[in-house]
C-alpha cells in the first residue's frame, strides 16, 4: 500500500493506492451514514454493490455509460433522488467509475446543500492516473465539454489497481495516454518507462508516478491559474478532436500531443503511441476541429495558452493565436 497526501490546507486528503482495497472500503471511507454510490452501466455492478453493502444506508444510482451522462438533466435527476431519500449535509457521495462518473458525482456532491462529502474510487486507467484527483467537477452543456462545474476536492481517493483487470485494451491504452502526458511534461523517467515497452509489468509505477506529478502540480496551483495548465498538454487540439466524435478522450489527447512536441522527440512519441495502438492522426476535417477548439473554455479572445514539450520532462507555456494553431491541426488530419 502507498499513501500520497495531497496538501491543500483545509481541503487536504489522502490518495490510497492498494490492490484489493475495494473489498475493505469501509476501513478507508466514512460510510456510517446515507451514501449514494454513483456508477455507470459499463462498470461491473458488483463494485458499487460492494460499497453500498458496507454503508449504513447505501444505495446505488447507475447512469448510462458515456459523455452524454455528464449533462444538466442527469445532474438534476441525481439531486432529485437524493432529496427524495432525505440526504442531509452529513451524508456522502461515492463515485465508482471513470472520469465521467467522477466528474458528475463530484459536481453533485458540491452542489447538494452547498456541499457534502465526496469520495472517488476510479476504475479506469485514465481516472486513476489523472481525473480522480485535483477536484475538477463538471458537466457538459450545448456540446461544450466541462463548461459547467466547480472545483470541489474529494475527502479521499481510493486507487485499486485490481479494478483495471476487467478493462479492454483500448480503454487501458487511452488512459495511458494521460500518463504519457505527465511523463512528457514533468517526469523523464516516466516517459522512459513507456519507451521500454513492458507496460503491464510497470503499471503500478506508471500510475504512482503519474499521481505524483499531478499531486505536485495541484498543490501549487489548485485552481488552474498558472502551473496546472501543463495538465492540459495535448488537450487544446485534443478537445477539438473529441467534439467531432468517434474517439475516446485519451485517444484525442494522444493525437493532440504530437504537434506540441519538438521535432527531436516526435518520432519517439509516435513510436510509443503506435506501440499502445493509439491513433497518430484522425479522419476529420481540420476546419471542424478548429471551430470546436475555439469554443474551448481555456481560450481567451482570439488567443489560447498552449503547452509544448522541447524534451521529455520539460515544458514551455505560451500564448498563441488561433491562426497559429490551424496549421498544426492540419498535420494530424487525413
Image (cartoon, rainbow, N blue to C red):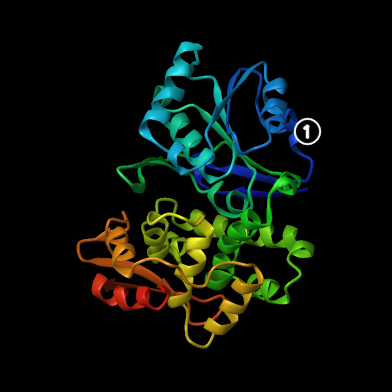
Q: Which residue is drawn at 31% across and 58% down?
A: 292
Residue 54: x and y in percent read 72, 22
Q: Toward which corner of the image does residue 298 lie, by quadrant? A: bottom left
Circle 1 residue? 23
Q: Residue at x 55, y 70 (%)?
A: 186
Quadrant of image for the C terminus: bottom left
Q: Which of 98 and 1 is in front in this view?
A: 98
Residue 300: x and y in percent read 24, 60
Name the side, left or right, on which 282 lies relative to 195.
Answer: left
> Is the residue marked by circle 1 packed among few (<14), some (14-19), or many (20+) residues within 10 Å?
few
Q: In this view, does 251 lie above or below 20?
A: below
Q: Which of 143 and 94 is in front in this view?
A: 143
Q: Toward which corner of the image does residue 40 lie, by quadrant? A: top right
Name the side, left or right, on which 277 lies relative to 82.
Answer: right
Q: Toward which corner of the image does residue 327 lie, by quadrant? A: bottom left
Q: In this view, does 201 lie above or below 166?
A: below
Q: Which of 248 and 23 is in front in this view?
A: 248
Name the side, left or right, on which 241 lies relative to 119.
Answer: left
Residue 293: x and y in percent read 32, 61
Residue 238: x and y in percent read 43, 63
Q: Residue at x 60, y 57 (%)?
A: 175
Amino acid at each position: 500500500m502507498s499513501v500520497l497526501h495531497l496538501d491543500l490546507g483545509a481541503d487536504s486528503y489522502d490518495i490510497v493506492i492498494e490492490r484489493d482495497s475495494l473489498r475493505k472500503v469501509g476501513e478507508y471511507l466514512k460510510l456510517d451514514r446515507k451514501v449514494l454510490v454513483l456508477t455507470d452501466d459499463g462498470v461491473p455492478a458488483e463494485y458499487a454493490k460492494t460499497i453500498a453493502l458496507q454503508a449504513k444506508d447505501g444505495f446505488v444510482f447507475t447512469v448510462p455509460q458515456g459523455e452524454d451522462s455528464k449533462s444538466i438533466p442527469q445532474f438534476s435527476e441525481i439531486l432529485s433522488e437524493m432529496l427524495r431519500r432525505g440526504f442531509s449535509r452529513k451524508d456522502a457521495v461515492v463515485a465508482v467509475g471513470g472520469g465521467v462518473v467522477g466528474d458528475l458525482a463530484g459536481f453533485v456532491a458540491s452542489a447538494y446543500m452547498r456541499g457534502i462529502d465526496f469520495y472517488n474510487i476510479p476504475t479506469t486507467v485514465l481516472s486513476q492516473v489523472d481525473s480522480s484527483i485535483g477536484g475538477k467537477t463538471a458537466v457538459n452543456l450545448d456540446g461544450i465539454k466541462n463548461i459547467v462545474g466547480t472545483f470541489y476536492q474529494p475527502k479521499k481517493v481510493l486507487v485499486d489497481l485490481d479494478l483495471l483487470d476487467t478493462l479492454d485494451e483500448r480503454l487501458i491504452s487511452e488512459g495511458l495516454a494521460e500518463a504519457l502526458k505527465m511523463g512528457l511534461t514533468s517526469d523523464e523517467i516516466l516517459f522512459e518507462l513507456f519507451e521500454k515497452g513492458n507496460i503491464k509489468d510497470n503499471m503500478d509505477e506508471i500510475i504512482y508516478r503519474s499521481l505524483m506529478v499531478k499531486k505536485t502540480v495541484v498543490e501549487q496551483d489548485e485552481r488552474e491559474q498558472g502551473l496546472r495548465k501543463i495538465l492540459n498538454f495535448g488537450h487544446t487540439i485534443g478537445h477539438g478532436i473529441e467534439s467531432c466524435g468517434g474517439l475516446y478522450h485519451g485517444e484525442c489527447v494522444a493525437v493532440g500531443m504530437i504537434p506540441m512536441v519538438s521535432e527531436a522527440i516526435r518520432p519517439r512519441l509516435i513510436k510509443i503511441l503506435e506501440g499502445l495502438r493509439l491513433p497518430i492522426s484522425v479522419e476529420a476535417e481540420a476546419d471542424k476541429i478548429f471551430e470546436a477548439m475555439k469554443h474551448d473554455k481555456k481560450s481567451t479572445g482570439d488567443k489560447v495558452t498552449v503547452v509544448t514539450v522541447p524534451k521529455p520532462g520539460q515544458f514551455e507555456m505560451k500564448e498563441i493565436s488561433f491562426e497559429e494553431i490551424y496549421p498544426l491541426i492540419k498535420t494530424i488530419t487525413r
